Each structure stands twice: as C-alpha cells, then as structure tokens.
Image (cartoon, rainbow, N blue to C red):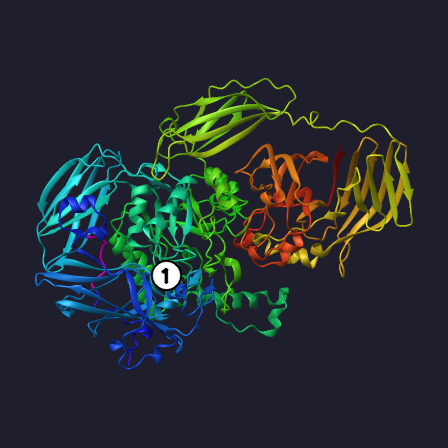
C-alpha cells in the first residue's frame, strides 16, 4: 500500500538533505574552471531512457510495485504527456481538480520510472541523488528499498543514498504522481504536465562535505570597494577551506585559508546587465574544488527609487515560462540560451521567472550574459479565488438597492483567495517553498529581487515568508503583487515588501499613484502589456510613463513565448487549450507570447525592441538631440549611429557617427539639417552595435529612429498620364447606373449605394462589389469589446441606399447618395452621404460624410473593402514593412514598400486582424493609384475577415478566391486588453461624425 504522504501537508519531504545552494564539486582547479558540470568526475548523470509504466490511478499499482519491471521506455527529462501518455491540459486560474484541500482525486495518474546504473561505491564518499524538477511529487526506491519522498515541482530534491547502494549494478525506481497536496500551490497559468522534467544525477561527495555556503558581498556607497565573505556549512563539522579569488580577467587577486574569512577588494569591477563582470571564487578542501562565479553589485532603494550600483534603472523585462512545443517543461541549456539571445537582440534586460524557479543553471546564464532576475517561488494558488459563493437571487439585479449586498458577496469571494495564504495547514508548505528557492539560488548575482510567488492572496503565511527572506538575505529586495490588495479581514503587513507591485495597471494608474502625497515605494509592473495575438499596442505609452517617474522601475511584459504543444509532432501542428479534449480549459489564453512556441518573433517583439531602443533621437529647433537610455554605458562604447537624409524617398546624404554621451544624458548630433522646400524630408537613424557583446554579434542593429523634418510626400511623379479626352456615357436603370468610357466602365448599385463593377480595358478590376467596411476579425485584445461590437451588429452590417441622384456633365459624372449601414434586429449603425465623382481622365473620387449614433460602441474601423483578382502586386508608402497601427508602429518606418497579399499576411495561431499599415499616402498597382487627402490605413490579405473569424487555427484557413484590399479612413488601435486596460480613447475610432475622401486613378 502506497503511504499517503501526497495528501498530508505536514509531510513535505522525507529523508531529503536540507535545502542548500546549488553547486557542483570538481576534482581539481583546472576541472572546476574549464569543464562543464557534467564533465566533473564527481557528477554521475542519469539522464537518458528509463523504463516506464503509466497507470490511470495510483490505486491501479500492484501491491509489490517496487519489484515491477516496466517494459515501456521514456526519455528523462521529459513530460509524459509529451510522450503520448495521459493528455495535455491548459487551464489558467481554475484548478484542474476539485477544490478539496489537502485531498486530490482518487483517479490520480502516476508513473513508475526505473533504470539501472553501475557503481563501485567508495567507503570514504557520500552519494547524493538529485532531482532538479519532478511534477508533482516522487517516491524514491533504491534497490527496491524505500528511500524517501519529496514535493515542490520546480526545486531540487536531494537524497543521500549512500547506505542503499551496492557494488556493481544498482536499480533506481521513482514513482511520480500527477497530483499531490502541493498541486494546490502550483496553479500557474500554463499547460499542466507531469513527470521527471529536469536533470537527474548523483554527486559523489566527501564524508564530511561542504553542504552549503552563502557568498555575501557588500559594495561601498562610493562603488570603489567591496567586502566578500563566505558562510560555509559542512554536513558534519566545520573544516578549513582554501580559497582563491580571480578577477573578471582570470587573474589571481587574493588567496587564503580558514573557516571564517573576509576579503577586502579595491578598484572593483561591478556587475550589471550591460556589463556582466564576474569574479571567480574557488573553494578547496580535501579532494573537492568548487567554483562559483560572483558579481559585485549594490542593490538599494533610496527615496522611493530602485538603484543598482547607485544608478536608477528601468526593468525592460519579460515573464518567462519553461516551455517548448516538443519537449514541454524539459528545457536544456541551448534552448535557454536561444531565448536569452533573442531577448538581448530585442533590448530586454530583465526576466521574471514566472511563476517558479527555473533550472538552477538558468540564473548562472543570466549572471554570465547579463540579465536582472526576479526569481519567483513555486507558489500560485489562483484557483482559490474561483470557488462558489452563494448569490441571493435578488442581488443578480445590479441596482442601487443591493450594491452593498454585491460588495459583501464580492468580499466573500475575495476571502477565498486567501485560503492558502492564511491556512495554518499550509503555512509550512509556503515557508518550505520559500526556503527551497532562496537557499538553492542565493549565490546567483543576477537575482536582484526575490518574489514570494504569484496570485495567491495575502495573509500570515506570506508575511512570515517575507520576514524570513529579509532576515536571511537583506542584500536583496522582496516582491509580492497580491499584498497590495486587502483581500480579507486580516490587515496586511507590508513592512517586508519593497515594492508597490501591480499587474496590468494602465499608464494612467501609474500616474495617479505618483500623483498622491506621501512616501512611495517603487512602482513595479510585474505583468503588463499582455502579448496575446496581435498586441502590445500600448508599449510606447508604458515606456513614456516609466521614464516620467523615477520611482517607476519598469515592468515585465506578459509573456515571452506562446504555450503551444504540438498537436501532431509529425506535422508540427501547434495547439492550445481545448485541442486535447480536456476540461476545464481556457482556450488560446496561453498563446500570449512575444515569440511563437517555435521562437519565431511576432511583430509584438519587434515593437517592444524599438520601444526599448538604447538611444532615442528628437528634433530640437534646428538640431537633433539624442538621449542615452542605457544605465551604465556611454554611447561611444556601445553603438555606431548611421544616418540618412531623404527627400521624397530619395537619399540625399548618409554617413556614420560615433559620439560620446554618458548614461541618462543627452547630446546634440553634429548634423546640418537640410532647408525645408515643401518636399517630404526624413532623417533615418540606425543604432548599430560597435563591437560584439554578450550573445550579440558586432553590427547588430538595436533600434532606429525616423524623424519627419518637413513636408508631405509629393505624389505628382506617381500620377498617371491622363486618358485621352472622351465623353462619359451614362445609362440609368431602375436599380443600376452604368458609366462607360473607351478605356474603362463602371456600374453603380442603387440598392447598396456602392460601385458594383469596375472594368479597365475589358478586364474586371473589382471581382465583387465595393463594400463599406467597419468590421475586423477581432484580435485577442478585442475579446471584451468585440461582444459589444457584435451586439451592435457590426459584424454583419450591410449598406442600404435610400436615395441616389445622377448628374452627368460630359467629362464628369457625379452620383450623390444617402445611405446607411444596417444589421438584422439592430438599429441603424451609420448614416452616410456618399458622393461618387467619375472623370473622363480615369479618376474616381469617393467622398464620404458619416454619422454614428451616440449610444453605439466605437468602431473597429471605417473604410472600403475591394475584392481584387489574385496575384496582385502592390507598392505603397506607409509605415512598414511590418504591420502598423495607430498605437503600434514603433517597429516600422515610412518608406516605399512592395508586397502581395500572402506576404502582407501576419500569421497568428488563432486567426485575427493583422497586416494593417498606418500612415499610408498611396497604394499603387499595375492598374491604379489609390490615395487620399490625409494619410490612411490599409490591409491587403488573401483571407477575408469572415474567414479569419470563422477559423480557430491558422492551419485551418482557406484563402479567398480574391485578394482583399481594405482601405481605412481610420482603424482603432490594438492595445493589450486581452488581460490589461481598455484601449485608450485616443486610439479608438469613436468620432460621432467625420468625413473622408478616397481617390482612385486608373492608368
């Protein structure tokens, strides 16, 4: 019978070693300095294929299961769902099991892992078996003898197996359960997977081995001196340690021996994310050499401002899960480095480990390559907030009389959120996860903030955790977002928390926070600008607000990558919640990354990159100023500035500059601006890496600016030669008007009030009638407002003409109409006056005057939809070549581009609006030139809005038989409202009346 430790919160670990720092001993100094951990003689790796048996429930285990010899095999590390066992499940907040703590379902899947290894144990050595990550708990057997039990999915469990080993062949058996009482504290927003998903290995140690040590550093306020000391803990009794300290260039600067010693350093090299200088500390006793890279940095808060090395910094960060479509949670170093390389290339300097500690070597990579880390404990109990609360029938009516009752019910719901934060039964589990996390990673320089966990309410248990962290490690800061909300009757104690942390606060909320009186903690956005689908339209607004207030220390975009396992490994079909038939699930809410699951950057990442560019330029009078947004690096030591002046898109002057500008300072560029002459004059600046940097090659472009110096694009050279003068012939019928010219003809539909046909030289230019267009395939950020749009009928609007009047002047024809946009069951959406002016030189002008009722929601867009023949090639002048919108255009610039419908499409796993271009001056094809009195937006796609709406996955899309061109007077912005603030008023098409005009010149 399996001992029921997995439903007993008082049993967290049995026979594990105490939580301690992560390190790997080596047999020599050379080995420690030159070899990877796996190459140490003391490291016995157990990764590889293990025998495996899966059971739908632990109750199906045979009584003598430790003697079982599984026949199947599975790679370790891996998740068993990725190997065809059980099934995937994505749920965000809701628990995948009944809320019945500490109990979990009787139908609790489990798996037996078994492998053999050969070993000749030495009597003078201890053998420590390490599991770096097992979801959710494990029972360990060596040579069929029970060794111990452990939980905490994302932290190490270490067992001393010395007395269980025999000479020769040894057998290891691990029983892993899918759920345990710890699962209630692991309700993170991710696909739920199980198994041994991180490395497994044995360490060969001395009998009295160095079990733990804490490297303490203290940098002086003048940043010139530092103290370094080590607090060692041996497994039996204190031993003398020899030490050597090497500087970042590898030169020996100090050595000594003892068991209590302190190193005084002068003329120090400081560590920061821009210049990650690392010293090497080598500890030696007996036959063990231990290397720890350590950086010197000073972390503090002064007058409400976060300072690192006495400099106010901004986190330009992301939240990162361990996730891969093929390997699930099992992430190797190369996969992690690929992530870090992409982050560096896109100006990201900070990571929040959402919502658990990463592999122990991940922080080492951040030390080495330069990233600030918020390292988070493996705690999230979000599902506690979703429990049923009785709602009196009369309170369903939201009226003034029962608002107090609603508030009582709301508060009762919130009280549930604090269940684990306040439960005495789970206090030790929360503290244990805090201990495990901090103790394992306490020697990692890149960790500047400890996070107690995520979205688990607040109460006595977290207060105890915060107090312990501050006592154990006062050199770092402590964060926990849920503490700012008064979730329960318990009065929150925030003394040990260093930040006012929020999620998805609007820029206006940050402004309000700093607008009130009183001392302020630094404002930290631990999650913001939700990157789901076509998103991050507010990235520039957040940048501006962060820069406005010194106490705003930046934020962490949610999130780095889409969580999308392959539905079909062979066909590489990515999936999201519900695709595996699971319940409950939260659909595509996991597809919310700056990069795809396969690490293909979305336009969101490119937008964020240029928002976070290291320097920015602006015009000040007749000069160009640049500001250095780096925190520790002079521009001259980092970047080359390339510049190019253009006039009406033609380059007139270019060159390179290398200028000196200190961090957080501004200088003027030695550039002479051309005199304005009525032409469009642009200055393009590119910021290129002057020399190789961590993970980046010399010459990498880190951002750009484009400044409009004067004028607007002159289209005169684009206007086609006029057709030979010839009278226009008109024919008016009951329901149509036909206009003919020797070179072109068109028809007007008196029922819809639009052009129903347009031909040139006998070829149809319009494959279907022209349409007034207000609908877009909702983006993920439209998920809330789109319900309002659909309730108003925007998704099914059609035009109806009430009156049309034909005026023919020989060389010109004018059709004046009064129309409306209508939808079944709904009141009028828009009232339009549309004038069509056709001239005998091939010009068609469409002038529109539009009115919208006060009560209706803002429009997704307004413009015209044209159905063109396939394989069209378009030239355009607009913000490109990437997609651009009124609030999402930092990654694009004005220029002439060429595209076709397929190339212009931007692919999202869940289809939605994409590929628009803002600030367009003209569109040109082989048949026409299209332009307007003012810059407009356009979209060119092989898919209709209807098709994008109808299909759930990109691989299910079917191309239209037409290429679809949408030209928009305006389109509402993108924002990040899928899990963030509503779209700003300034970015909405919310005008109650407006006018616009489009011109189409045939040639």
Q: State the extent of the magenta-drawn residues as a range.
A: 17-24
Identify which residue is drawn at 47% across, 49% down: 595
* Quadrant (top left/top right/bottom left/bottom right) for the N terminus: bottom left
Q: Inspect the magenta stretch and tell me whether residue 19 lies in it.
A: yes
Q: Which one is nearer the viewer's eye here, 789 or 134? A: 134
Q: Is residue 304 visible?
A: no
Task: Left or right? Give the position of 528 relative to 811.
Answer: left
Q: Secondary structure at mark 1?
A: loop
Task: Left or right? Give the position of 567 relative to 76.
Answer: right
Percent position of residue 165, x then y: 15, 68
Task: Left or right? Give the position of 26 relative to 592.
Answer: left
Q: Which one is nearer the viewer's eye here, 240 or 64? A: 64
When the figure is inspected, residue 6 is found, relative to residue 453, above or below; the finding is below
Quarter of the image holding residue 910? Answer: bottom right
Q: Is residue 959 visible?
A: yes
Quarter of the image holding residue 698? Answer: top left
Task: Left or right? Give the position of 256 relative to 320.
Answer: left
Q: Classify 10 Å Cα crowding around label 1: few (below 14), some (14-19), many (20 and above).
A: many
Q: Inspect the magenta stretch and tell me whether residue 838 lies in it.
A: no
Pointer 1 residue: 379
Percent position of residue 620, x then y: 53, 24
Quarter of the image holding residue 817? Answer: top right
Name the outermost residue toward the front.
762
* Quadrant (top left/top right/bottom left/bottom right) for the C terminus: top right
When the figure is inspected, residue 138 is found, relative to residue 676, above or below; the finding is below
Q: Main secondary structure of the magenta part?
A: loop
Percent position of residue 299, x then y: 31, 43
């Amino acid at each position: 019978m399996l001992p029921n430790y997995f439903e007993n919160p008082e049993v967290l670990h049995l026979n594990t070693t105490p939580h301690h720092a992560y390190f790997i001993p080596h047999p020599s100094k050379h080995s420690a300095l030159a070899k990877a951990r796996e190459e140490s003689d003391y490291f016995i790796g157990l990764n590889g294929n293990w025998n495996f048996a899966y059971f739908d429930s632990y109750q199906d285990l045979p009584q003598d299961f430790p003697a079982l010899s599984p026949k199947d095999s599975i790679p370790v590390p891996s998740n068993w769902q990725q190997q065809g066992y059980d099934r995937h499940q994505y749920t965000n907040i809701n628990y995948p099991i009944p809320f019945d703590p500490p109990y979990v379902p009787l139908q609790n899947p489990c798996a037996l892992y078994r492998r053999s290894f050969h070993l000749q144990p030495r009597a003078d050595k201890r053998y420590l078996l390490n599991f770096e990550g097992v979801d959710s708990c494990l029972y360990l057997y060596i040579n069929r003898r029970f060794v111990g039990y452990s939980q905490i999915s994302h932290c190490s469990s270490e067992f001393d197996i010395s007395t269980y080993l025999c000479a020769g062949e040894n057998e290891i058996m691990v029983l892993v359960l899918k759920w345990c009482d710890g699962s209630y504290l692991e309700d993170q927003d991710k696909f739920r997977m199980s198994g041994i998903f991180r490395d497994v290995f044995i360490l060969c140690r001395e009998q009295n081995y160095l079990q733990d040590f804490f490297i303490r550093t203290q940098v002086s306020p003048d940043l010139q001196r530092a103290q370094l000391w080590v607090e060692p803990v041996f497994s039996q009794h204190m031993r003398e340690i020899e030490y050597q300290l090497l500087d970042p260039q590898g030169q020996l600067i100090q050595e000594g021996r003892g068991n209590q010693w302190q190193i005084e350093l002068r003329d120090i090299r400081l560590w920061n994310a821009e210049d990650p200088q690392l010293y090497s500390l080598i500890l030696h006793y007996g036959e063990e050499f231990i290397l720890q890279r350590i950086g010197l940095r000073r972390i503090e808060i002064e007058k409400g401002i976060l300072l690192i090395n006495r400099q106010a910094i901004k986190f330009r960060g992301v939240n990162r899960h361990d996730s891969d479509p093929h390997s699930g949670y099992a992430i190797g170093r190369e996969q992690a480095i690929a992530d870090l390389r992409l982050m560096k290339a896109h100006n990201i300097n900070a990571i929040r480990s959402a919502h658990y500690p990463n592999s122990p070597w991940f922080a080492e990579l951040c030390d080495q390559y330069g990233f600030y880390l918020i390292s988070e404990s493996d705690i999230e109990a979000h599902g506690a907030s979703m429990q049923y609360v009785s709602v009196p029938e009369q309170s369903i009516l939201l009226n003034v009389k029962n608002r107090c009752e609603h508030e009582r019910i709301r508060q009762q719901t919130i009280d549930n959120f604090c269940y684990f934060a306040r439960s005495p039964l789970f206090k030790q589990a929360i503290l244990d996860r805090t201990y495990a996390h901090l103790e394992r990673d306490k020697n990692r320089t890149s960790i500047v903030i400890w996070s107690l966990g995520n979205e688990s309410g607040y109460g006595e248990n977290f207060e105890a955790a915060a107090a312990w962290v501050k006592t154990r490690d006062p050199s770092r800061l402590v964060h926990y977002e849920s503490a700012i909300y008064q979730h329960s009757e318990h009065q929150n104690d925030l003394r040990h928390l260093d930040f006012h942390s929020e999620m998805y606060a609007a820029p206006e909320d940050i402004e309000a926070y700093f607008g009130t009186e009183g001392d302020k903690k630094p404002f930290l956005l631990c999650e913001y600008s939700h990157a789901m689908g076509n998103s991050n339209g507010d990235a520039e607004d957040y940048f501006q607000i962060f820069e406005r207030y010194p106490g705003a220390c930046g934020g962490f975009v949610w999130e780095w990558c889409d969580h999308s396992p392959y539905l079909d490994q062979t066909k590489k079909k990515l999936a999201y919640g519900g695709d595996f038939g699971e319940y409950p699930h939260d659909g595509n809410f996991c597809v919310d990354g700056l990069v795809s699951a396969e690490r293909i950057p979305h336009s969101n990442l490119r937008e964020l990159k240029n928002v976070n560019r290291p320097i920015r330029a602006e015009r000040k009078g007749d000069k160009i100023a640049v500001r250095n947004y780096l925190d520790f690096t002079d521009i001259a030591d980092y970047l080359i500035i390339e510049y190019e002046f253009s006039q009406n898109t033609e380059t007139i002057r270019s060159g390179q500059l290398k200028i000196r500008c200190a961090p957080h300072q501004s200088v003027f560029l030695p550039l002479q601006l051309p005199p304005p002459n009525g032409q469009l004059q642009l200055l393009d600046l590119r910021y290129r890496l002057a020399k190789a940097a961590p993970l980046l090659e010399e010459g990498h472009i880190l951002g750009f600016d484009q400044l409009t110096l004067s004028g607007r694009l002159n289209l005169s050279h684009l206007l086609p030669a006029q057709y030979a003068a010839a009278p226009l012939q008109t024919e008016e019928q009951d329901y149509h008007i036909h206009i003919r010219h020797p070179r072109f003809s068109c028809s007007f539909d008196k029922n819809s009030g639009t052009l129903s046909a347009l031909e040139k030289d006998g070829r149809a230019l319009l494959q279907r009638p022209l349409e007034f267009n207000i609908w877009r395939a909702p983006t993920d950020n439209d998920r809330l407002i789109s319900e309002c749009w659909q309730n108003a009928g925007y998704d099914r609007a059609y035009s109806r003409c009430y009156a049309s009047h034909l005026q023919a002047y020989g060389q010109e024809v004018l059709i004046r109409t009064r129309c409306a946009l209508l939808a079944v069951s709904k009141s009028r959406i828009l009232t339009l006056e549309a004038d069509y002016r056709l001239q005998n030189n091939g010009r068609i002008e469409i002038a529109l005057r539009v009115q919208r009722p006060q009560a209706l929601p803002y429009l997704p867009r307004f413009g015209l939809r044209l159905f063109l023949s396939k394989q069209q090639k378009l030239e355009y002048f607009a913000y490109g070549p990437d997609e651009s919108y009124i609030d999402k255009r930092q990654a694009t610039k004005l220029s002439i581009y060429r595209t076709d419908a397929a190339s212009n499409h931007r692919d999202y796993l869940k289809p939605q609006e994409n590929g628009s271009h803002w600030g367009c001056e003209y569109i040109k094809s082989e048949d026409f030139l299209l332009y307007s009195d003012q810059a407009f937006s356009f979209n060119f796609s092989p898919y209709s809005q209807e098709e994008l709406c109808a299909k759930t996955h990109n691989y299910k899309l079917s191309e239209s038989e037409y290429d679809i061109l949408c030209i928009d007077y305006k389109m509402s912005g993108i924002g990040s409202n899928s899990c963030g603030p509503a779209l700003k008023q300034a970015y909405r098409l919310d005008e109650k009346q407006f006018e616009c005009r489009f011109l189409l010149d045939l040639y």
